[in-house]
Amino acid sequence: MESVISNSLTPMLTIFSIPKAFRRQIGVIQTNAIKSWTQLRPSCEIILFGDDEGTAEIAAELGILHIPNVERNEYGTPLLNSIFSVAQDIASHQLMCYVNADIILMSDFLVAIRQIQKPSFLLSGRRWNIELKKPLDFGSPDWEEQLRAHLAEAGKLRRSSGFDYFVFPRSTSYDMPPFAVGRGSWDNWLPYKARTLKIPLIDATEAITIVHQNHGYSHIPTRETGAWKGPEAKRNRELSGRIDYGFTFDYVTWILTRKGMKRALSMRHLYFQMRAIPVLYPNLYFLLNLFKIAERILIPVRSILRLNLENE
């Protein structure tokens, strides 16, 4: 089967996202992120969802597609299954990228994706956290060089648990439950779902540098109804199947480097690939308890799990 980007020197990509309201510092952060996507070459199609304050204005300013009406739950929070479905229906390109609206993308993004020669895959990479208080000057020819220098000095690579973007072929259907955006769990469910579909799960951290601009969570009303503690977070956990179905970067099957693809064959990766088997095959689920016991009491297993933790 032919790759979705084979014989193409320049992969065509549709990026979609759903920003928060453009207020105060989060407005600066999201403007930095979305403007960075417009700097990618070749140019990407960009779709912004939602009608929160400022979304229509930045879409108009940058000449990008805006879909204001999205399905929401009873709390008014947009639902990701609807966003993914509409984006895949209307996208102009065969490759899709969902990305959080606080993530800056740089020139290595499309260069890395160009290396993928598989008909189906789910790709993501760990993010670098950094403080950015001011708008980036995208009119400067060395904006990326300056940002990378700042990142080298003050950036911190996030641990392996969270995902901030996903690249996948438009034709892939994940049959996503109605997860609420920004309430956790869904991003760890999607890699699990890819594994159940026998889709290669690719870690692109070595090849792609994504920049997360640190921010608070004032857009979440209170701690009790927040991203990880309220009823929406609880529902997301229930929809995901809870913690055993929440896969991290430890569960990847491939690594994308600047020199190409390689199998994920470190001891840590091999251990988690074995650990995934009882979750992926329900008739073997009872075996998962053996892994949990080993992780609590066996020194060799605990040593494997500590590998590479210095970067987390």
Image: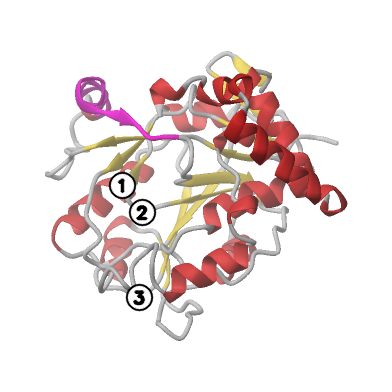
Q: Which quarter of the figure has residue 211?
A: top left
- The three-letter amino acid code for the residue at tag 3 is Asp
Residue at mark 2 to residue at mark 3: CA–CA distance = 14 Å
> Is residue 204 positioned above or below 283 on the image?
above
In the rendered structure, find residue 101 and report the number of the disc placed on it.
2
Q: How would you rate the neighbour count of disc 2 (Cα within 10 Å): few for under 14, some for 14-19, many for 20 or more?
A: many
Say which quarter of the image contains residue 230: bottom left
**Real-space CA distance between mark 1 and mark 3, rounded to the nearest whole angstrom:** 18 Å
189 part of magenta stretch = no
127 vs 183, nearest the viewer: 183
Q: Which residues are magenta?
A: 144-159
Could you tell me residue 215's position as x and y percent? 22, 51
| Quadrant location, the N terminus | top right
Residue drawn 22% across and 29% down? 143
Q: How many marks?
A: 3
Residue hosting label 1: 33
SS of the residue at dot 3? loop
147 drawn magenta? yes
Tell me: residue 153, above or below residue 284. Answer: above
Taking the view exactly as shown, the residue that stands out farthest to the bottom is 74
